[in-house]
Amino acid sequence: MKSRVFKGTDNFVKKEGRRCGTARRRTGKLLFILLGHPQCLDYGPPFQPPFHLEFCSAYETFGCCEQEKDNHIAAKYWDIMDYIDPQAQKLCGGFIKDILCQECSPYAAHLYDAENPQTPLRNLPGLCFDYCSEFHLYCRSAITLLTDDRHIQEWCEKNRTQFCNILNIQDKDYCFPDVVKNTDLNNNLGVVVADKKGCLQLCLKEVANGLRNPVLMVHANDNTHRMFVAEQVGLVWVYLPDGSRLEEPFLDIKQLVLTTPWVGDERGFLGMAFHPQYKENGKFYIYYSYQDKKKVEKIRISELMVSTADVNKADITTERNLLEIEQPAANHNGGEILFGIDGYLYLFTGDGGKAGDPFGKFGNAQNKSSLLGKVLRIDVDGKGPQERPYRIPHDNPFSSDPKARPEVYAYGVRNMWRCSVDRGDPLSHRGKGRIFCGDVGQNRFEEVDIIIKGGNYGWRAKEGFECYDTKLCQNSSLEDVLPIFAYGRSVGKSVTGGYVYRGCESPNLNGLYIFGDFMNGRLMALQEDERTNTWKKQDVCIGSIKACAFPGLVSSYSKFIISFAEDEAGELYFMATSYPSAYAPSGSIYKFVDPARLVPLPSSESFFLENSGLESTVCISPVLKLLPSKTKPVRKSCPRTKNVEKDETHLVINSNLCPNNLKDCLMISKTAFLQII
């Protein structure tokens, strides 16, 4: 035993049936399947160590430690054991090992409050209150060996309750060991089902599956109604209007894209947009993570062209780099790229990563000389000075400010994940051109914003509607654009921006901004009150099996909502996965369907095949028909109602809602008649 005296050994009271060692080890082995928001202390994603972990073996399949770190933790553990007697070792060995090994947990960033830079990085992980109380009861004197924090040591001696309050963390989902038992975080096959609280009832059609983290689905607006689906690894697939996927990818840049198989890695192929004149010039644009020859991580925005020999293949040799931005950390990579109705290309960058935007005096987001934490706008139809591969739009808000980058259109954003352009109301055109974004919060609030020229969206001074950095927040010069909606951790933990619905098939949804939360799979909608210019949230619930009892519809979906999409006809989709890894083929694409617009399911299934009296009702406009499997195609029907008195099928088409598609609607029937309203 070393000369250091270990005080208070009388606190190590032996209790019959103590399970410090075995129970703790059992708990640790569950962690490899956790799928909430895993992140290491260096803000990178967890990984599978290349070598066996001898000490923190619970994390050798998925965690944040390599062999060197594992050996370092083991050495620290045995050093502590040298200071305590055998009885204390027996009682507290399991506690101490578990606490030390939380640096290897895939949730280490949460456990040590690394995501909250307003508090110093903890040298002890967040412990759940009951566990902490038990630890304090039997191992109180070991605290001085685990931490040099005098504040913690002082309260350890004074008051157990206050001591455990200090060791707790704000987000209780992540305290140890409850993080292991949390079903929302552990259930890698989680699905969301119907809710009976009166929220908006919708159904889904699964239109594709087997995808590896499908991060986006876009159309080329070229009247082909093809959909281009991108996987995070750097592959883009073409889905034809008949629902089939072409065997060869449209684009394959896996060798260029920086990503890993580890759950939580935010890097990869992140954005894609087609030029407004793509039909004529064949140009499109991509946004992806990249590592240069010096191992410096960057985000790259490039222009490419479609092959002149094959309209379903990109010509990779035409890649022209427009912009590269150094990424100081592995997280907060942004990733959205889109064209506004003004014809300019908008880019949405993250704040550079880590936590709390710690770069410089004000952070990247508030620094207009940095391209990080920004909405950028460029003109890709020309070159600028010094052979810059793009022009600066003449009305960019900071183009004449010598202290700002001229590309900056808006600033003060943290990590906008998924933005969209509103097509506008089909009648009044109200809302046309508005850009909606979901901005992922730090540790308290998620928000939805509408982008305006020159706007400051508050980060890091604010998070949602609340102050984050008190000093910046109280600065009288801060004139920030408030979110149209923000929500706290009781609702969700990682917003995924969506779309304003403007399609024809579900007119009840017209004007609703539909979005979701990645972490818990929650779907939500915002309804605008035009009189007050405010937005009201409504939950979107996927109907019961009975409510969605139509051919091809489903009433559940994979939990982790990655992105939303809109097809060429304006119908709305979202992409989700049951296992959020860039290499796991667990992703699916779902189409929203309003069951109120469908014919009620009759008692006999043969109604759909033999006894309908309506031989065929077909929209011949080539609207996307992605299929859940290689079975019979599901025909797209025009809106129908049943005329009971005449016992005949009655088609009602609202020509105001779908003026462009009306001429494409063709009905062939023996007994039906068509009413245009």
Image (cartoon, rainbow, N blue to C red):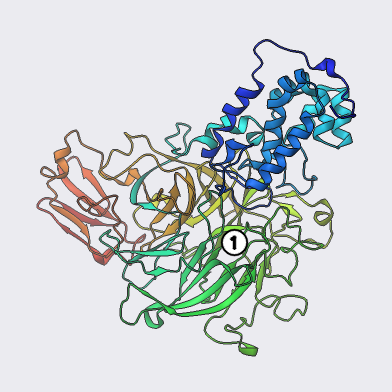
Q: Residue at x 73, y 70 (%)?
A: 368
Q: Residue at x 25, y 55 (%)?
A: 636
Q: Position of residue 155 (x, y in %)?
A: 86, 28
Q: Position of residue 151 (x, y in %)?
A: 88, 34
State left or right for residue 48 relative to residue 177.
Answer: left
Q: Is residue 538 above or below residue 634?
A: above
**Is 446 in front, or is 508?**
446
Q: For label 1, count other residues whose C-alpha is less than 10 Å away and answer few (under 14), some (14-19) or many (20+).
A: many
The quarter of the picture where residue 18 lies is top right
Residue that badge 1 annotates: 334
Q: Position of residue 498 (x, y in %)?
A: 50, 55
Q: Secondary structure at mark 1?
A: loop
Q: Is residue 420 visible?
A: no
Q: Label 1 is placed on what type of residue? A: Gly
Q: Is residue 593 visible?
A: yes
| Outermost residue toward the bottom in this view | 386
